[in-house]
Amino acid sequence: MYLTPQHVLLAGATGLTGEHLLDRLLNEPTISRVLAPTRRALAEHPRLQNPVGELSTTLAQLSGRVDIAYCCLGTTLKQAGSEAAFRAVDLDLVVAFAQRARELGARHLLAISAIGADPQSSIFYNRVKGEMEEALKAQNWPQLTLVRPSLLLGERLQPRLAERLAGPFSRLLPGKYHGIEACTLARALWRLALEEEDGMRVIESDDLRKLGKN
């Protein structure tokens, strides 16, 4: 069964995937409102509501009906500056955003995790992503979609050196390890939101690439 969400909450709209997803949402005539809190103001649009400020502060101020929520939040250890700061964004802030989305009535959460997410992993990044997934599962969403993209490909406003170096190589890797374009991931996220499938599902990167084809 396919449903058309009319009121969408989006976190991470200024990020690589979030920018593509926001553009897609605002160009969908069926969408009545996109509520996208950001730290810097977005370009105005008649169907965009854009509270500006730190998300940890603006979450409590969000209001209005929400059908689905997208979480495209994510940083790197280098950008965060420490493991504690990384966890504050990729775990704590993600969980707080999801909880607020539930309070606003959202029945479906789509969240970007990462390939290799595992709460028992010896790799810090993968372990935090796995802990984030477990925390979202514990919120008992009617519908929860966790996507695990491989290396994201695309031009960022603030380029990440590691992604630039690994990008060409990632295009040669097989299956779910093959790099994925951010615009492809955004299309896949939109299409997944149209499907009504109760419970939780995890979508790996190779399936995301198929779903996000033009």
Image (spheres, rainbow, N blue to C red):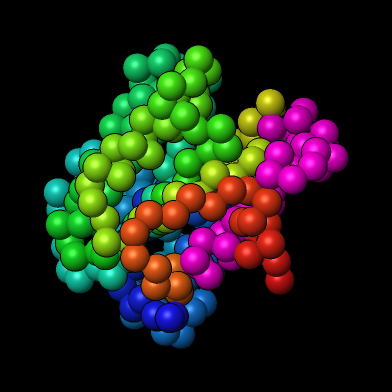
Q: Position of residue 34 (x, y in %)?
A: 35, 68
Image label count:
0
- State the predominant SS element of the stretch in magenta: helix
Residue located at (68% from left, 51% from top): 206
Residue located at (74% from left, 45% from top): 175
- In the rendered image, the quadrant that contains the N terminus is bottom left
Residue located at (48% from left, 41% from top): 113
Residue lying at the far bottom of the rendered structure:
29
In the displayed structure image, the side of residue 137 where residue 13 appears, left or right: right
Closest to the observer: 205 or 186?
205
* Residue 186 forms part of the magenta stretch: yes
Q: Quadrant of residue 63?
A: bottom left
Closest to the observer: 179 or 62?
179
In the displayed structure image, the side of residue 210 where residue 37 appears, left or right: left
Residue located at (47% from left, 29% from top): 118
Q: Position of residue 209 (x, y in %)?
A: 68, 57
Q: Is residue 12 above or below residue 192?
A: above
Q: Quadrant of residue 73?
A: top left
Q: Position of residue 2 (x, y in %)?
A: 44, 80
Question: Residue 201, can we see it?
Answer: yes
- In the rendered image, the quadrant that contains the C terminus is bottom right
The segment highlighted magenta reads: 163-192
Q: Position of residue 166 (x, y in %)?
A: 76, 30
In the displayed structure image, the side of residue 57 where residue 146 appears, left or right: right
Q: Quadrant of residue 67?
A: bottom left
